[in-house]
Amino acid sequence: MKKIDKKNIARLIDHTLLRPDATDADIILLCEEAVEHGFYAVCMHPSFVKKSRHVLSASKVKISAVIGFPLGANMSNVKQYEALEAVFSGADELDIVMNTGFVKSHNWEAVEKEVTDIVTITPGVIHKIIIETCNLTDNEKKKAALMVVKTGAEFIKTSTGFGAGGAEVKDVELIKSATKGKIGIKAAGGIKTFHQVLEFVNAGATRIGTSSGIAIMKEALKRR
């Protein structure tokens, strides 16, 4: 396994809070924790982006907003509007849920158009497309991954964390193999330990989404 020091681990993490009952105070704390531990980004619902922008104005921590979360089944124009509003509010990155129903229907043209449209109208931000691997066959995962590369998005993300399953090492390996390193991979959903982070990074993940960032950093310090 690769040896990754504490600072490098922190810079891989999107410190995440997507609970439906999260409060303003919870989001402020999330941002303060991200600054304290040096996390790369905070990930949240779009309605909290403006408040987070104010809290993080003097920091290097990026703000990521989820779009079409958690099912991805919203109307395409609604997802576009949500993406635009998130960017106007101060989001640096967008975690966009792909329409799984389109994928399962093998309506690849609709899938690609929806993602491409969102990427096109929000230039200058990072786009992470959530393919919700737990709902797809291996062949569908490969096709979805290759389609995301074509759209110009910068990352493929494994999971919302709200599906029947979360990130799996084998899926990260499959995505990396299919895309031949042409796109970033964000592993997310159920990642709670330092050991899991190392496993996913060694499998090819270049970003980690987790709500257990603090615990992971404490474990990393103990192991060091």
Image (tube, rainbow, N blue to C red):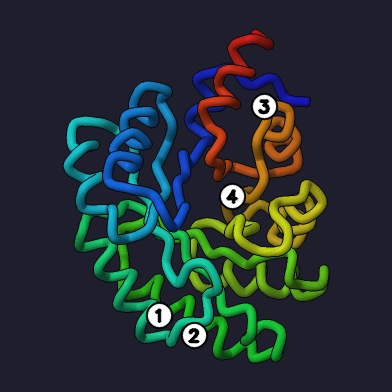
Mark 3 or 2, closer to the camera = 3
Tag 3–tag 2 contact (CB < 8 Å): no
Please report the residue visible at 75 percent of the width from the left and 62 percent of the height from the top: 178
Q: Which amino acid does label 2 sit on?
A: Lys
Name the secondary structure under disc 4: strand
Q: Which of 27 and 41 is in front in this view?
A: 27
- Ranked by sequence position, the earlier of labels 1 and 4 is 1
Please report the residue visible at 48 percent of the width from the left and 41 percent of the height from the top: 14
Name the secondary structure under disc 2: helix
State whether residue 72 is above or below residue 212: below
Percent position (x, y) of residue 77? 36, 86
- Ranked by sequence position, the earlier of labels 3 and 2 is 2
- Ranked by sequence position, the earlier of labels 4 and 3 is 4
Residue marked by disc 1: 117
Mark 1 or 4, closer to the camera = 4
Q: Which amino acid does label 1 sit on?
A: Asp
CA–CA distance between discs 1 and 2?
6 Å
Mark 4 or 3, closer to the camera = 3
Please report the residue visible at 73 percent of the width from the left and 58 percent of the height from the top: 165
Tag 1–tag 4 contact (CB < 8 Å): no
CA–CA distance between discs 1 and 4?
21 Å
Tag 1–tag 2 contact (CB < 8 Å): yes
Residue marked by disc 2: 113
Name the secondary structure under disc 1: helix
The C terminus: image quadrant: top right
